Amino acid sequence: MDFSELGEFGFIDWIRCSYPSSSPSVIKGIGDDAAVLSFSNDLVLLITTDQLIEGFHFRLGETDGEKLGRKALAVNLSDIAAMGGYPIGYTVSLGIPSKRIPFDFVDSFYRGLTALGEMIGVELLGGDTSESGDRLFISITLLGKALKNKVVYRAGGQEGDLIYVSGWLGEAALGFHLLEKGISKKGKENIFFRYLCPIPRVKEGQLLAEKNLPRAMIDISDGLLADLNHLLEQSGLGAEIELSRLPLSPDFQLWTKEYGFDPLSLALEGGEDYELLFCVAPEKSKEVEKLSQEVSLPFTCIGKLIRGTKGIWIKDAKGVIAPVLPKGYNHFKSR
């Protein structure tokens, strides 16, 4: 089978089915935002890893070392946030095309990396380096911890649960497309920042988990539809999403209109928002709204989980409901 047929998620499923874990220490292996290992009677260890490859995840002409360092750590922190965990430390492996990339760039990369780490309270523990030929390669493995009874998994959603998303959707995807077109950053700094320096919702994920609010949670990396579909696959349910409820910032609406981008396409399929997507029992909605005010970040209810039909259904402004494919970024298929 060709990789373009299998796709990223088909490949992950193949690994999970072909090489299942048999260790009693592994509570959750492949198939969530982080692996979960038993650590003590009360604590679990969380492990996640992400890689960024030049030409696929970033272009050096569009960012600098400091921003790239922040983003490399942020995407890993977002995985721990989605589990409701507390990051501990991380290792960094770099493949450096040393004839093309100067030491100053790598120096600024580590400055950005450790600056975000200090802000969150997570330390650099080690790693590896190698010559890499013609592309810069970055791989970070992040360790975290959580109380065993507070970990939030992708599985757990129930019929009637309300679907919430933190922050705003589509801004990172818009920033990417504006960069692609070479459009000036002036007046759009926040949009570009959302793509180049995403903010992991670590504190928000911890507070949600501490208060036992989400039944299921994931971070939005591949796009709202794609990541919501991951939650649905774990719960065996469907979802109904109301387009009018999608949180779209004024800046996002202004610049999508100005440059002719489809705001709904970017919000639903764009990816790299690194916001939290979570399911909550209806009776806990007021607690979610209260927490939203406490952290000064919108938690927006965009729909609900439904039984009887699987997949994602979209409700438009006229009340018409129709199925939609869970499009989003998918390595191998998105080439």
Image: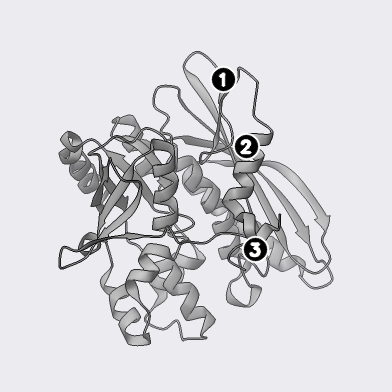
Mark 1 to mark 2: distance in Å?
22 Å
Q: Secondary structure at mark 1?
A: loop
Percent x, y for residue 172?
44, 67
Q: Nearer the viewer, residue 294 or 233?
A: 233
Camera-nearest residue between 92 and 133: 133
Identified by mark 1, the residue type is Phe
**For marks 1 and 2 on the same chain, the one whose residue lies earlier in the sequence:** 2
Rate crowding at label 2 as few (under 14), some (14 to 19) or many (20 or more) other CA atoms within 10 Å.
some
Q: Does the image show residue 170? A: no
In the picture of the structure, the residue carrying the numbered disc 2 is 16
Q: Earlier in the sequence, mark 2 or mark 3?
A: 2
Residue 230 coordinates in the image, percent (x, y):
45, 46
Answer with left or right where residue 40 lies relative to residue 320.
right
Q: Position of residue 27 (x, y in %)?
A: 54, 24
Q: Is residue 261 above or below residue 191?
A: below
The image position of residue 324, as x and y in percent, is 36, 60
- Which of labels 1 and 2 is toward the front? 2
Q: Amino acid at mark 3?
A: Ser
Q: Are marks 1 and 3 in contact (CB under 8 Å)?
A: no
* Quadrant of the frame with the C terminus: bottom right
**Residue at 44%, 51% in the rendered image:** 227
Provide the residue designation for mark 3. Answer: 108
Tell us which disc is closer to us: 2 or 3. Answer: 2
- Asked if residue 269 can be seen in this view, the reply is yes
Q: Residue at x 33, y 86 (%)?
A: 258
Please name the amino acid that badge 2 sits on.
Arg
* Image quarter of the N terminus: bottom right
On the image, numbered disc 1 is attached to which residue?
39
State whether residue 195 is above or below residue 282: below
